[in-house]
Image (cartoon, helix red, strand yellow):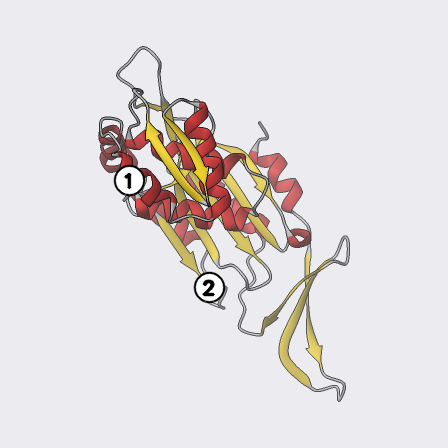
């Protein structure tokens, strides 16, 4: 697993900012951003755009986490699409919690997703999420843990959202863990399976049905574009059902990181995480 220092090396490219002039050599009020090392364009921004580089953001995150004596944050996944114009970094805290009361453990731990961009498409974003250690599932915790978004304005202060994240970190153990523990005891009614699946795109529905069938929670058949399902004797808990979607979303190569996060937030809303 890569350490944060290695991640910083990958994002520590210099960003050049230059004014854009029209053919009459008049200032347009916009700037272009590009990488000094490769010359790749990163985006066009207004003069009011507050530039916070990926390395500055990550250094501040690491500094505040260390200062606040949070459990060690281990990098899980780094994505730098659009020639590095966007950054998605997922971190998992080393402290683990066991949701299972059975002999087979079901460990989860809190995590953070750091999002930054140079192309105005994304705001600076710091999110909290759950990391399921057993099978590497991730489900974003939307309400119970934390989310902070800030536009890149001249007054953008990177340290503010990080400090707020630190303040609410204890909510994971106080609020999120009891909620998830309750989900391991709740059984999903058969009619809820399809009605929940209908809230997602077709490819998620199809892969989720395959996941449930392979693990013998259900059987299903398709006729005339209609799906009929039947539950088996194996109990499907709400927690099992949540992890069906998170498994599909974190093991697919069909969507971008940005889209995957959007669907994970939809999932969080549906299950009131």
Q: In the image as oriented, which residue stretches furthest toward the front?
A: 224
Which residue bears the numbered disc 1? 192
Which image quarter: residue 178? top left
Nearer to the camera, 152 or 184? 184
Q: Count of labels shown? A: 2
The answer to whether 143 appears left or right of 19 in the picture is: left
Query: Which residue is pictured at 36% across the width and 25% down the height?
Result: 217
Query: Which residue is pictured at 60% across the width and 35% down the height?
Result: 5
| SS state under label 2 | loop
Query: Would you say residue 125 is visible in this rendering?
Result: yes
Tell me the quarter of the image containing the C terminus: top left
Query: Which residue is pictured at 26% across the width and 33% down the height?
Result: 188
Nearer to the camera, 138 or 36? 138
Tell me the quarter of the image containing the N terminus: top right
Instruction: Examine the rendered structure and indicate whether residue 153 appears above or below residue 12.
Output: below
Which residue bears the numbered disc 2? 151
Q: In the image as oriented, which residue stretches furthest toward the top?
A: 103
Instruction: Examine the rendered structure and indicate whether residue 204 appears above or below residue 95.
Output: below
């Amino acid at each position: 697993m890569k350490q944060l220092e290695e991640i910083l090396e990958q994002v520590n490219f210099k960003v050049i900012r230059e004014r854009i002039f029209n053919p009459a050599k008049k200032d347009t009020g916009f700037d272009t951003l590009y990488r000094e090392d490769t010359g790749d364009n990163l985006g066009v921004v207004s003069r009011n755009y507050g530039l916070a580089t990926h390395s500055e953001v990550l250094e501040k995150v690491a500094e505040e986490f260390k200062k606040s004596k949070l459990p060690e944050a281990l990098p899980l996944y780094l994505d730098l699409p659009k020639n590095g114009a966007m950054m998605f970094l997922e971190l998992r805290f080393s402290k683990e919690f066991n949701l299972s009361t059975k002999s087979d453990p079901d460990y989860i731990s809190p995590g953070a997703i750091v999002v930054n961009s140079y192309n105005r498409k994304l705001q600076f974003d710091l999110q909290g999420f759950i990391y399921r250690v057993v099978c590497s599932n991730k489900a974003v915790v939307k309400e119970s843990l934390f989310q902070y978004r800030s536009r890149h304005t001249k007054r953008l202060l990177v340290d503010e959202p990080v400090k707020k994240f630190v303040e609410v970190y204890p909510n994971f153990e106080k609020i999120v863990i009891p909620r998830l523990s309750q989900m391991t005891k709740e059984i999903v009614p058969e009619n809820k399976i399809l009605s929940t699946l209908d809230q997602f795109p077709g490819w998620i529905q199809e892969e989720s049905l395959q996941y449930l069938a392979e693990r013998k929670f259900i059987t299903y058949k398709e006729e005339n574009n209609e799906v009929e399902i039947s539950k088996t004797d194996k109990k499907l808990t709400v927690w099992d059902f949540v992890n069906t979607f998170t498994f599909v979303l974190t093991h697919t190569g069909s969507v971008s990181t940005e889209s995957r996060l959007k669907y994970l937030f939809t999932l969080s809303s549906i299950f009131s995480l």
